[in-house]
Amino acid sequence: MALSTIELKLPVPAIQGYFGDRLASYATQATAQSIVALLGHDPRSKNWKQLLPEVREIYEFLQRKTAKNRRDSLTGYMEDRFAPDAITIGAFPAISIGFIRPLDFEQSSDSGVGTLKIDLSPSTARVMLDGLGRVTAALDLLDEGRTEILDNMVFPVTIFAPKPGQKPLSYKELGQLFHDMNFKVQPVSKSHAVALDTSDLYITFASRIGEAAVISENGGVAERAASLGKKSTELVVQTVLVRFVRGALEGRAFQESNMATTENPNLTRETFAVEMEKIEGFLAAFADEMGSAFADRDSLHLTSPGWQALGVFYNDLAHRLNLESDQMEEFARAAGRLDWSRYNSDWIPMLGQAEIDKFTGADVVDQAGRKRVSIAGAGRSNVQNILDYVRRKTGVTDHLEVSSEEA
């Protein structure tokens, strides 16, 4: 009597689709814990040497090793978005797995819904095509026992395999799929990217600030604009508000570069709510002192250098001087009492020259005969000049000098 063999097949609910004559696709879902079972191996680059030679060769040909900073960024994203106390929603696009040979699929309806029966034997070669970084971060969190995060997320998965009856896929064909998924991407503009990106904690913070009454009730935030036009009704563009936030929370150098990092950030998931309350209070006091002038879109405090200077001014109060809320409010109101109009004579020549009427050739003046400043750009020097002016006029400069001497 012939010996019977045991076939280990994993039933996977899926929806079948097609791409051309050669390729079938199957859409399903998988927890981080089940990804290894679905693949038949741990796909993290640290384990590639332990894989069967043919599988290892595919990974080394197709994939990039997940860099530590990429892994840390993704685990941080998962902590921010999927933990029980997440500060905002989050999600991942589908990860993609490629199978060399056709798969056994039992269709249960005309809509393509059915069950994949995946052979778990090593001879069924399959590899991660897209999403290795996401899966690496999830499996690392699993190793760390962070089940409270992983229990709150399920990966959408797309499986690619030859259509039934078609020849196996080659390494080159899998490589083409990897290339298409990772490199055939059209970049979006910086302002559009910031509007769409909530994986950055500072962008998320800026979005929340934009919902505060002091901003939302005075026009709100222009999310995808690079700048405010003459017909704009919003108070600030999102990219400028992010600059304000970066300066307010971490200081001048952090504000100037989106690539800047800090070892001990003031903004973390744990401090998010406290920092939000403090900045809202600062802006509310500043706006209350200015009155209706706060929403004057021609005012310098609503320009890019004005917002950036106010952000670093807040950082002076909250993180360099470590003032209490009532003291911060006093300085915020002092800043609100300054003349932020373009007719403040102090701005010339600090920020630029007098504006010239293009028809008459004369200086543009207000009813009191004060010249209107024509700002020479929104560069670093103007941000610093406004900041120094606000510090000096509110008396913060003296406190900062004392603080520096004490340090």
Image: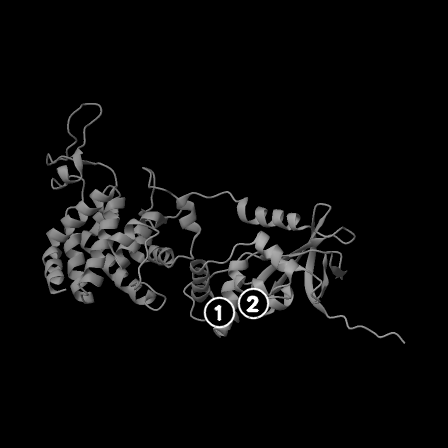
**Label located before the other in sequence (1 or 2):** 2
* Disc 1 to disc 2: CB gap under 8 Å: yes
Q: Does residue 115 show up?
A: yes
Could you tell me which residue is drawn at 62 percent across and 55 percent down?
58
In depth, the one of 150 and 331 nearer the eye is: 150
Q: Mark 2 points at which residue?
A: 32
Q: Name the side, left or right, on which 138 lies relative to 56.
A: left
Assign the N terminus to one quadrant of the image.
bottom right
Q: Name the side, left or right, on which 290 lies relative to 40.
A: left
Q: Where is residue 51 in the image (x, y as percent from the top left)?
A: 61, 64
Secondary structure of the residue carrying tag 1 is helix
Secondary structure of the residue carrying tag 2 is helix
Q: How was the colour assigned to the protein in this rendering?
A: one colour
| Residue 204 image-quadrant placement | bottom left
Residue 300, placed above or below residue 201: above
Query: Amino acid under label 1?
Result: Leu
Query: Amino acid under label 2?
Result: Ala
